[in-house]
Image (cartoon, rainbow, N blue to C red):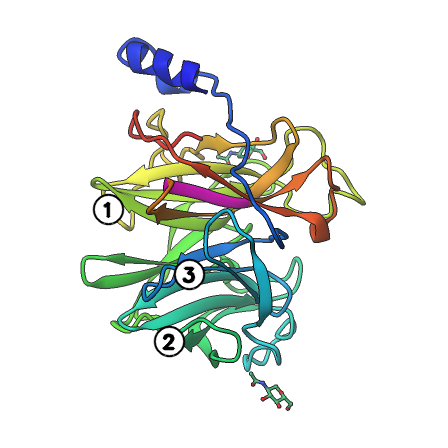
Amino acid sequence: MMFNRLIFGLCAGLLSVSSLVWGYADPGACSGDCWAHDPALIRRSSDGTYFRFNTGSEIGIWKSSALTGPWVYEGAVLPNGSSIDLAGNTDCWAPDVHLVGSTYILYYAVSTSGSQTSAIGYATSTTMEYGSWTDHGTTGISSTSAKPYNAIDPNLIESGTSYYMTFGSFWDDIYQAPMNSGATAVAGSSYQIAYNASGTHSLEGSFMYYRSGYYYLFFSSGICCGYDTSKPATGSEYKIFVCRSASVSGPFVDAAGKNCVSGGGGTLVLASHDYVYGPGGQGVMADPTYGTVLYYHYANTNIGLADSEYQFGWNTIGWSSGWPTV
Ligand SMILES: *[C@@H]1O[C@H](CO)[C@@H](O)[C@H](O)[C@H]1NC(C)=O
Ligand SMILES: *[C@@H]1O[C@H](CO)[C@@H](O)[C@H](O)[C@H]1NC(C)=O
């Protein structure tokens, strides 16, 4: 890892980024209850307590005083499910949590596996503690088979004084819509920002992170789940890609300059390695101790491949080339 970085630093001017083969560092430490699925990670601004939320578990809440743990399960955000009247509303997915003003907003998706009948809802809390969350139902972003996208996997980003929701999974992949000033309701029509025309168009779980003049669009691509019962062909399991743009709405390109809509671009950030299998469902957080951190779930081949065995992983991101490496 250090060796690769050193070589890169010396040769960056001579080699194209895409020609380099990166080694991946093992995930950082995790103790306590480290199960994860599409994790959302955030530090509470008042006291620095870490909160981690997961798909399933009615959006479970895990708490820790440090990124490395020990993580303790507290209870569910939506113990009675979502008020959105769609199938799947008692098994919400893909939490995404942000502090907007003085309120924490947790976005979630209601859908069922393989269905385009979906909606993005939200709940609010001022502390993120168990029992403090209020469900508000839909943001107005939803889909049916009449739409080119599937309205799941929400991710909010603030750009200047405006908010945008990025979302999508399969079909025509990743879309984005402007949100209102409170970041609670959609305020304009949706447009496509990333697409892979080949295979099953498996982009999903997007997460946007702003750094030094660029919006980095991370996404997962490949088969996410069910590895214990149906192991994907080698290389077709989940992995994490990135594209970037100087504008929140694109156009996004990868490190080789390939357009991430028309060219199917995407630079690989993290794929299976060593005991790590099928990493994805990622997010990025600026951590005061570890720097910018990529966090994700993965199957640990020493533990098991079932969804119920997925582990919380994180790595510090290196940015020396302007593109994230772990
Ligand atoms: C869930 O439903 C139970 C039973 O109706 C109720 O007592 C409880 O307050 C509800 N919890 C939330 C968070 O709405
Ligand atoms: C695009 O899809 C192909 C075929 O499934 C896959 O091999 C490739 O990794 C995908 N690329 C991205 C950036 O999603």
Left or right, 321 with reference to 55: left
Q: On residue 89, which mark appears?
A: none
Label 1 CB less than 8 angstroms from ligand 2: no
Q: Is residue 198 above or below residue 229?
A: above
Picture coordinates of residue 154 (x, y %)?
45, 60
Asked whether mark 2 and ligand 1 are closer than 8 Å, the reply comes as no
Kind of residue indicated by mark 1: Ser
Name the element at disc 1. loop
Name the front one of labels 3 and 2. Answer: 3
Residue matched to label 1: 247
Q: Which residues are magenta?
A: 291-296
Residue at image position (39%, 70%) is 105
Is residue 284 a member of the stretch shown in magenta? no
Examine the rendering and report whether any part of residue 201 can be seen.
no
Quadrant in which residue 200 is drawn: top right
Residue 171 or residue 118, whichever sits in front: 118
Residue in the picture at 54% in, 40% down: 29
Distance (Cα) linking label 2 and label 1: 31 Å
Name the residue carrying label 3: 49
Which numbered disc, 2 or 1, marks the residue closer to the eye? 2
- Which class describes the residues within 10 Å of circle 3: few (<14), some (14-19), or many (20+)? some
**Residue receiving disc 2:** 126
Ligand 1 closer than 8 Å to label 3 CB: no
In the image, residue 266 lies at what x, y percent? 43, 34
Name the kind of residue labelled 2 in the image: Thr
Q: Position of residue 181 (x, y in %)?
A: 25, 72
Q: Nearer the viewer, residue 185 or 124?
A: 124
Q: Earlier in the sequence, mark 3 or mark 1?
A: 3
The mark lying in front, picked from 3 and 1, is 3
Query: Label 3 vs label 2: CA separation?
Result: 13 Å
